[in-house]
Image (cartoon, rainbow, N blue to C red):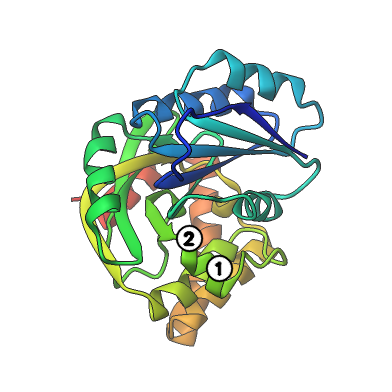
């Protein structure tokens, strides 16, 4: 079900459509909405795809935070994250598409340069850097690099035409549907890379677990990128177990120090 909880007085189509997925964690959702307050008025539409059992709290948060942007609300319980994103994609009207999960934050200081890039770029994909945090503390920055296998979706802006031509996310995946889609898109469309940090997200997520199904999905993405089978097995199955044991029995700080050394400056 779609509802317009706020509307723009300008009939012009927005430059950017931001899909925000939320399920029950209202504190994280509020932080995400507040991070969008720096966006220029009338520049964007926000599509909230809500998988919560009770929609009243989500609607109250949207009404309380005055964004100055058009907000469209979808209530579709109990969808998973990729079905929720796909529901949002079906409603997109902007030229560009950006996906944030509840708890992801857009960096205020980067909003101005972002819209310059969106308005001036001739590329179809814009790739920015993302700050990875744990419990509010920065750990490392995910570098914007064409050679990287995994591109955090929080740093990726796609022209809407890419979804019109390639379709939506494969809902059969639990955590890598965005990466599988991006693998197709980056092979067919032009990309511009920006060294500016555009967003931050917390490392504590489902994709950081050791569940075998999740590991198999990461193995598949690495295989798609041509990673050596033995190397792929180690990175997809062995390393997550070692990392999980260190995280559980020693200290997350050891994991964070390794991540910062590997991916940081």
User: Can the viewer see residue 264 in this picture?
Assistant: no
Front one among 167 and 249 = 167
CB-based contact (under 8 Å), mark 2 and mark 1 = yes
Give the residue furthest to the top. 64
* Residue 206 coordinates in the image, percent (x, y): 61, 49
* Residue 131 coordinates in the image, percent (x, y): 33, 42
Give the residue furthest to the front. 11
Q: Position of 139 compared to 22: left or right?
A: left
Q: Position of 158 compared to 93: left or right?
A: left
* Residue 140 coordinates in the image, percent (x, y): 30, 45
Where is residue 106, by image quadrant? Answer: top left
Element on which disc 1 rests: helix
Where is residue 102, by image quadrant? Answer: top right
Within 10 Å of the Cα at label 2, are there few (<14), some (14-19), or many (20+) other Cα atoms?
Answer: many
In the rendered image, the vertical position of residue 8 relative to residue 221, given as above or below:
above
Front one among 65 and 230 = 65
Within 10 Å of the Cα at label 1, are there few (<14), some (14-19), or many (20+) other Cα atoms?
Answer: few
User: Can the viewer see residue 184 in this picture?
Assistant: yes
In the rendered image, the vertical position of residue 224 relative to residue 173, given as above or below:
below
> Disc 2 marks which residue?
160
* Residue 155 coordinates in the image, percent (x, y): 37, 51
Q: Which residue is rendered at x = 24% and y = 59% of the image?
A: 121
Locate the N terminus and report the quarter of the image it occupies: top right
Q: Which residue is rendered at x = 42% and y = 64% of the image?
A: 150
Front one among 242 and 8 = 8
Q: Which residue is rendered at x = 48% and y = 28% of the image?
A: 9
Element on which disc 2 rests: helix
> Disc 1 marks which residue?
164
In the rendered image, the vertical position of residue 150 relative to residue 16, given as above or below:
below
């Amino acid at each position: 079900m779609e509802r317009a909880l706020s509307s723009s007085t300008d009939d012009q189509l927005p430059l950017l459509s931001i899909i925000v997925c939320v399920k029950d964690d209202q504190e994280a959702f509020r932080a995400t909405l507040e991070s969008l307050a720096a966006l220029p008025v009338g520049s964007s539409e926000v599509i909230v795809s809500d998988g919560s059992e009770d929609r009243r709290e989500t609607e109250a948060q949207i009404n309380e935070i005055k964004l100055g942007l058009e907000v469209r609300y979808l209530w579709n319980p109990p969808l998973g994250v990729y079905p929720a994103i796909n529901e949002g994609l079906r409603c997109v009207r902007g030229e560009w598409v950006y996906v944030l999960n509840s708890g992801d934050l857009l960096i205020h200081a980067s909003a101005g340069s972002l819209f310059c890039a969106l308005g001036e770029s001739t590329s179809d994909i814009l790739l920015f850097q993302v700050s990875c945090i744990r419990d509010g503390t920065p750990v490392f920055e995910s570098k914007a690099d064409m050679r990287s296998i995994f591109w955090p979706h929080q740093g990726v802006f796609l022209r809407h035409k890419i979804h019109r031509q390639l379709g939506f996310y494969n809902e059969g995946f639990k955590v890598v549907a965005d990466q599988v889609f991006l693998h197709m898109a980056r092979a067919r469309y032009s990309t511009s890379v920006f060294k500016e940090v555009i967003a931050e997200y917390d490392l504590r997520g489902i994709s950081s677990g050791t569940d075998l199904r999740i590991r198999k999905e990461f193995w598949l993405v690495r295989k798609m990128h041509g990673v050596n089978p033995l190397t792929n097995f180690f990175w997809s199955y062995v390393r997550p177990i070692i990392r999980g044991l260190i995280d559980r029995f020693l200290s997350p700080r050891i994991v964070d120090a390794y991540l910062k050394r590997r991916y940081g400056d």
